[in-house]
Image (cartoon, rainbow, N blue to C red):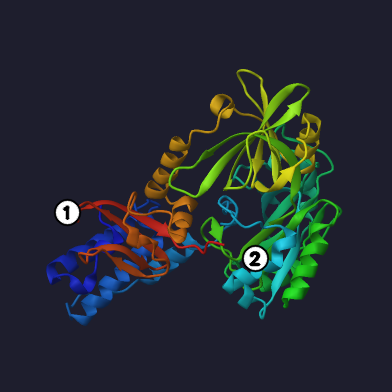
Amino acid sequence: MVHEEDINPDKLSNEVLLRYHIMTHIWWEKIIRGEVIEGWSVDDVFKKHREIAEEMTARELGLNEEGLHATPLQEQRREELNSINPFKFVRQPEPLKGRFERQIYSPETAEEIILSLKEWEEQLQYGIFVDKKQKGFGIQLHKVGNKIQVWNYRGEEITQKVTSLLNEIKKINHDFIADGIVEEKKYNEIEGTEKDLKIIISDLLWINGRDISQENYKERLEQLKENINQTINIKISFPKLVKSIGNLKKEVMIVSKLPGSKGAILKKSTFIYPKNEHTSGILKFENRLSINAELVKMEEVEGTNLIEYLTTINSGTKKISCGSILHEKIDAEIGNNLKVIFVELNKNIDPKTKKIWYEFFAPKIVGLAKESDSMKTAESLVEKSGGRTLEKAFCGKGELINNDNYNKEFKNNALLWETEEFDFALSKGWIDEKTIPKELAQGGMKVIKNKEEFLIKKEVMGNAMVILRNEKNEITHKKLVNLVEVT
């Protein structure tokens, strides 16, 4: 397969340049027919064709105008493929923060986090919107005329499960695509039932035939308020714009304490809706709850400075697993009780044994406790944190999750797929010579070569091509990585 970084027009002979010119034309015809070019996005093909055409023009190779430059049809088709259109679900972006956090993203630490992120600190002069993080789940509404479709955050259509809202949506006198939240406790997503549904619309992506996703968030909000009228059960989000760290800290604490709040969500006023699933334009600060759990086992995680701590809570004389925590080493012994803060506590039921066990989301150990909590406390925290009750096999048969398997899975993900694991590990320098060349940990360099001057990383058009080589400097793997800011 030909990769983008293999084609350097200014380095090619006339014969090879002409061959690639024909190839990109053929690819473009396939794209117009709706086909996909493996390893290439629409933008990649378009831009590479343009680079080739410009080089051919510079060499005066004499092809006709259509062969040399992007035609109006190509321009139009490229815009169509990259634009947002009705009844085609758009992946809702998430901040990269969360899965690997070592800082606590809670309302109390908002000032500390903002000041530690240079881009966000500088954003204050332009404004940052602060909003309540609503309990519920994300949805996307599409309306054109009387036709309406609704998707949940996973891209599953749920139009027929929210029928009580359809008449209210029809009363909005505009065609639109919008993101929103269905309030928790108003909709049972698993059973697919509805009762007194309420939707809060937070962003407008498309209005009356016009894609506005690439306008900044402040402008999109103004159009949302201007065009989408509120009804009894359809409300509009009204985040507050702040331009100082003091006001930001104050507003974060206010919204995080409102009824039904899970914390605060921040968006840059200049935030552009991304075409991929992650964005550095949003930050989430989530209210933390705490539980006291007994430490029953701990084990070092190979290749890191982290310890995996296995905890339990009490159910009479029985010990119930309360999940494991990856954390820096602390001064604790087996049998000590740990105070653990977390965002969410899920209740799991093993499908075979029907054994109940609990699992943290984003836990952090903050100290020692006098005694461990009971199963009754855990049950209340599942509900209070908005956790779920799921059928899930018990991990490790009462022991720690196998660290070798965890490390192997992490490294495989980092090497083989476009995942957060790769981007996060690369930015932190966690991936070294044991997995890929150590030079790749050199942060923001656009081009990195190994000691023998062979290319191992090159940034092009917002992406990075990472190349793995063997001892003979032969290419063994290539990976195209979306460049995202890790917060």
Mark 2: amino acid: Ile
Q: What is the x, y in percent for residue 223?
A: 71, 70
Residue 176 shows in the view: no
Along the viewing direction, whichever of 444 and 292 lies nearer the viewer:
292
Q: Residue at x 18, y 78 (%)?
A: 62
Q: What is the x, y in percent for residue 420?
A: 49, 53
Instruction: Identify the residue position indicated by label 1 in the image.
Output: 472
Q: Residues within 10 Å of mark 1 (few under 14, many from 20)?
A: few
Along the viewing direction, whichever of 406 and 457 lies nearer the viewer:
406
- Horizontally, is 271 left or right of 180 in the view? left
In the rendering, which numbered label is found on residue 113? Answer: 2
Reply above or below: 293 against 239. Answer: above
Q: Residue at x 70, y 68 (%)?
A: 111
Q: Residues within 10 Å of mark 2 (few under 14, many from 20)?
A: many
Which residue in the rendered view is the most extreme toward the top? Answer: 353
Residue 440 shows in the view: yes
Reply above or below: 106 against 351. Answer: below
Mark 1: amino acid: Lys
**Quarter the C terminus occupies:** bottom right
Along the viewing direction, whichever of 430 and 385 lies nearer the viewer:
430
Q: Are marks 2 and 1 in contact (CB under 8 Å)?
A: no
Quadrant of residue 197 in the image? Answer: top right
In the rendering, which numbered label is found on residue 82? Answer: none
Q: What is the x, y in percent for residue 228?
A: 76, 63
Q: What is the x, y in percent for residue 1?
A: 25, 51
- Horizontally, is 167 left or right of 268 in the view? right
